[in-house]
Amino acid sequence: MRLVRTMTLAVAAQADLTVDDADELRMAVDEACNALINAGAVSFEITFVQSDNLTLAIRPSPQLTLTITPTTEVILKTMTDGMRIEPDGTISQERKVNPARPPDR
């Protein structure tokens, strides 16, 4: 879990998210991983994709049917700009990327 949190913060920094946005994304990823572990996931495959948004998908192994608690749902929805759960248990989360800032002078 520490590696997942660290990678999330590193990718968020690379995407130029603010410290607050990066920390909220880290909390959402942590909550998603805990929900998957509680549902029986043994391992994860995590994919980060950056375009207009930073999108990450957490795919559990083995595949599973995921039912999340109301508290987890609130955390996932409020700490990201978009969230969905796929039939195989994959949790996808999005965070809007800040527009390019002018270089420091």
Image (tube, grey):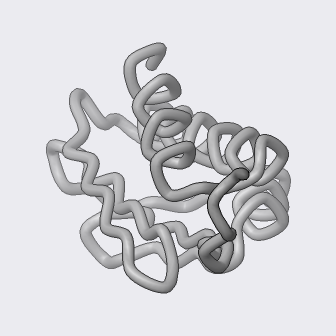
Residue 69 in sight in this render = no
| Percent position of residue 37, x then y | 43, 31
Judge by depth and name the residue closer to the eye, 58 or 16: 16
**Residue at coordinates 68% horizontally, 69% vertically from top-left?**
101
Total tally of numbered discs in the picture: 0
| Percent position of residue 49, x then y | 31, 67
| Percent position of residue 102, x then y | 67, 69
Left or right, residue 85 beside residue 100: left
The quarter holding residue 96 reads: bottom right
The residue most toward the bottom is 52
**Residue at coordinates 49% horizontally, 85% vertically from top-left?**
52
The residue most toward the left is 62
**Residue at coordinates 27% horizontally, 47% vertically from top-left?**
46
Residue 47 in sight in this render = yes
Q: Is residue 18 above or below residue 56?
A: above
The residue most toward the top is 2
Left or right, residue 84 beside residue 18: left
